[in-house]
């Protein structure tokens, strides 16, 4: 489950204290967490990339999450639309507001904030008991993982989100945390943003021992060219 929930931006739903019944989720991480807290039956719209859990595939797709199809969203008659905050969907968010549709943004960047997100979704959807149980279990597992970390030399790795142009996973991301918990060092573990473009020379200068290329999602789309053996950063001759 992707982590970091920070709800509160946007127009909150006016439900008279009643749980939200119809949600359009515009990020795979949001969709997964909604299902995990027992609110999957409230999800009436998802993005093309929301393919987990398997039950999410039965929910009608409204297309892309960062460039939302407002007409497709409106057709699902949502009480609330949940989005990842991005300049790419700002125009669509404003259109939804103009139509009187409530929206909220939620960041999914850090592991620990799965806990915050689960509890928030539990309150929104009336599934607080299941959500609180999930949050407590996740918190305990995260504490155990941190306690089990070992000191010593770390192999430096690089995580690619995209290959052309290269987009690397950086600090401020849950992937960065996972690399650290696994006992490795992250080549782009500096401050946020959680992802950004990087030139091949910059990548080579970080001297990663392992580059993890992106693969195709489980919906059946094939892997990107970065998964092929011909994609190689140039060797750094001045490092």
Image (tube, rainbow, N blue to C red):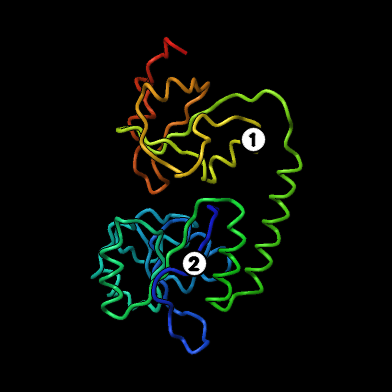
Q: Residue 85 location in percent, x, y?
A: 39, 59
Distance CA(mark 2)–CA(mark 1): 29 Å
Q: Residue at x 48, y 89 (%)?
A: 16
In the image, residue 118 above or below residue 170:
below
Q: Residue furthest top?
A: 237
Reading the image, the residue beneath label 2 is 7
Q: Is residue 223 visible?
A: no
Where disc 1 sits, the SS reads loop
Mark 1, Cα crowd under 10 Å, few <14 / some 14-19 / many 20+, is some
- The x and y percentages for residue 29 are 48, 56
For label 2, count other residues whose C-alpha is less than 10 Å away and answer few (under 14), some (14-19) or many (20+).
many
In the rendered structure, the answer to whether residue 78 lies left or right of residue 149 reads left
Q: Is residue 163 visible?
A: yes
Image location of residue 63, percent across then percent down: 29, 59
The residue tagged with tag 2: helix, strand or loop?
loop
* Residue occupying the point 59% across, 51% down: 111
Image position of 202 with respect to 222: above or below = above
Q: Position of residue 43 (x, y in %)?
A: 44, 70
Residue at point 54% right, 70% down?
Answer: 121
Name which of mark 2 and mark 1 comes first in the sequence: 2
* Residue found 52% across the figure and 86% down from its top: 18
Q: Quadrant of residue 166?
A: top left
Q: Which residue is mark 1?
A: 182
Q: Are marks 2 and 1 in contact (CB under 8 Å)?
A: no
Q: Nearer the viewer, residue 81 or 45?
A: 81
Quarter holding residue 89: bottom left
Number of residue marks: 2
């Amino acid at each position: 489950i992707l982590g970091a929930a920070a709800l509160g931006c946007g127009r909150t739903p006016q439900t008279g204290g009643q749980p939200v019944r119809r949600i359009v989720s515009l990020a795979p991480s949001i969709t997964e967490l909604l299902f995990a807290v027992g609110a999957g039956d409230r999800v009436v719209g998802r993005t093309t990339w929301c393919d987990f859990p398997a039950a999410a595939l039965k929910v009608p797709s409204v297309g892309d999450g960062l460039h939302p199809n407002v007409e497709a969203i409106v057709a699902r008659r949502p009480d609330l639309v949940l989005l990842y905050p991005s300049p790419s969907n700002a125009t669509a968010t404003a259109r939804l507001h103009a139509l009187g549709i409530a929206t909220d943004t939620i960041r999914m960047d850090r592991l620990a904030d799965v806990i915050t997100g689960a509890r928030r979704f539990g309150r929104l959807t009336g599934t607080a008991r299941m959500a609180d149980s999930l949050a407590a279990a996740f918190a305990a597992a995260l504490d155990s993982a941190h306690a089990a970390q070992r000191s010593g030399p770390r192999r430096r790795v690089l995580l690619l989100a995209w290959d052309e142009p290269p987009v690397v996973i950086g600090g401020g991301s849950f992937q960065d945390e996972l690399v650290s918990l696994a006992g490795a060092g992250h080549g782009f573990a500096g401050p946020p943003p959680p992802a950004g473009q990087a030139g091949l020379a910059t990548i080579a200068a970080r001297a990663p021992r392992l580059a993890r290329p992106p693969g195709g999602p489980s919906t059946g789309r094939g892997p990107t060219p970065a998964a092929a053996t011909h994609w190689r950063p140039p060797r750094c001759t001045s490092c």
